[in-house]
Image (spheres, rainbow, N blue to C red):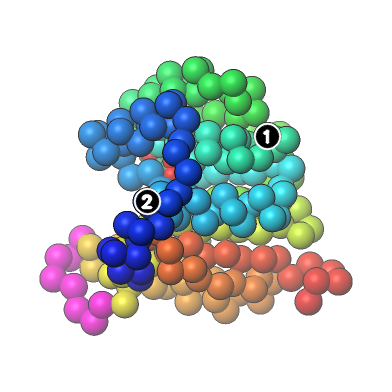
């Protein structure tokens, strides 16, 4: 992962965000909401503005931070986002209601493992952003990659889990189990027959998986 000094340097030259986005960053810090790290989201936005997806599916809204940042960066893009935690979903509603980008974002409340039918109404998606329960990534991928458009890309956040996936031994059992699951996901993803994947060691680690569609091998 990048060292602290380099991260601080990049953060120091990133453009100021809007007052609403600022407020969300503060809320997340105060309430321990794991929104994307600044360098991570900026990198993702950079790539998305090159990809220019018409429709994005996000699994894991939290308070709507990444959804809003994507909506701001891609004004023509429709974003569908899912959250199962009632309090976070409520906070997302409140924050997003104050944005002029509100109508670009469809917020769905519920467990992503159970919302396929509802989500399908908003697809197909050119980009799918997986940023929810780390132990379920493969399930999310299997369910929702069926809704990916021909040249679609799946982005998975937190695949390096603070660098823990590279540790030899981890004391805490709960963390160790989580790390195992992420390691399994990463290997499974890297060897997936239908996708080419690379992992960017920015933020908490972002995997980028491009479908190997026809004419695209
Ligand atoms: N993408 C957000 C951060 C998401 S944090 C941002 O960067 O701004 C991960 C969120 O995923 C949490 O709020 C958690 O409640 C939610 N989540 C975890 N598992 C989920 C599931 N199975 N279905 C829906 N939401 C889920
Ligand atoms: Mg994340």
Q: Which mark is residue 75?
A: 1
Residue 7 to residue 78: above or below: below
Q: From what the image shows, is residue 176 above or below residue 31?
A: below
Dominant SS type (magenta): loop
Q: Residue at x 44, y 32 (%)?
A: 21
Q: Work out whether 169 lies above or below 134.
A: below
Q: x, y (%) of residue 38?
A: 41, 49
The quarter of the picture where the C terminus appears is bottom right
Pointer 2 residue = 12
Residue in the foreground of this view, choosing between 94 and 74: 74
Q: Which quarter is ligand 1 in?
A: top left
Farthest front residue in view: 13
Provide the secondary structure element on which disc 1 rests.
loop
Range of the magenta residues? Answer: 167-174
Q: Position of residue 5 (x, y in %)?
A: 29, 64
Image point (69%, 55%), residue name: 50
> Dot 2: what SS?
helix
Q: Quadrant of the N terminus?
A: bottom left
Disc on res. 55: none
Q: Nearer the viewer, residue 91 or 133?
A: 91
Q: Residue furthest right?
A: 215
Instruction: Residue at 54%, 54% (x, y): give it.
Output: 44
- Is residue 73 visible to the viewer in this orientation of the structure? yes
Q: Is residue 46 magenta?
A: no
């Amino acid at each position: 992962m990048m060292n602290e000094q380099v991260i601080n340097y990049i953060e120091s030259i990133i453009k100021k965000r809007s007052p609403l986005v600022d407020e969300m960053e503060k809320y997340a810090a105060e309430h321990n909401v794991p929104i994307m790290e600044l360098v991570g989201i900026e990198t993702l936005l950079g790539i998305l503005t090159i990809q220019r997806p018409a429709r994005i599916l996000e699994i894991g809204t939290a308070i709507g931070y990444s959804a809003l940042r994507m909506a701001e960066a891609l004004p023509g893009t429709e974003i569908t986002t899912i959250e199962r935690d009632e309090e976070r979903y409520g906070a997302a509603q409140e924050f997003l209601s104050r944005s002029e980008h509100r109508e670009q974002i469809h917020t769905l409340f519920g467990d992503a493992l159970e919302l396929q039918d509802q989500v399908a109404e908003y697809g197909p998606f050119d980009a799918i952003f997986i940023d929810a329960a780390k132990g379920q990534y493969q399930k999310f991928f299997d369910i929702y990659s069926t809704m990916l458009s021909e040249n679609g890309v799946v982005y998975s956040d937190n695949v390096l889990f603070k660098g823990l996936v590279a540790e030899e031994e981890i004391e805490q059992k709960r963390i160790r189990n989580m790390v195992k699951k992420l390691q399994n996901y990463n290997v499974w993803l890297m060897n997936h027959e239908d996708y080419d994947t690379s992992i960017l060691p920015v933020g908490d680690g972002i995997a980028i998986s491009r479908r190997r569609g026809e004419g695209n091998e």
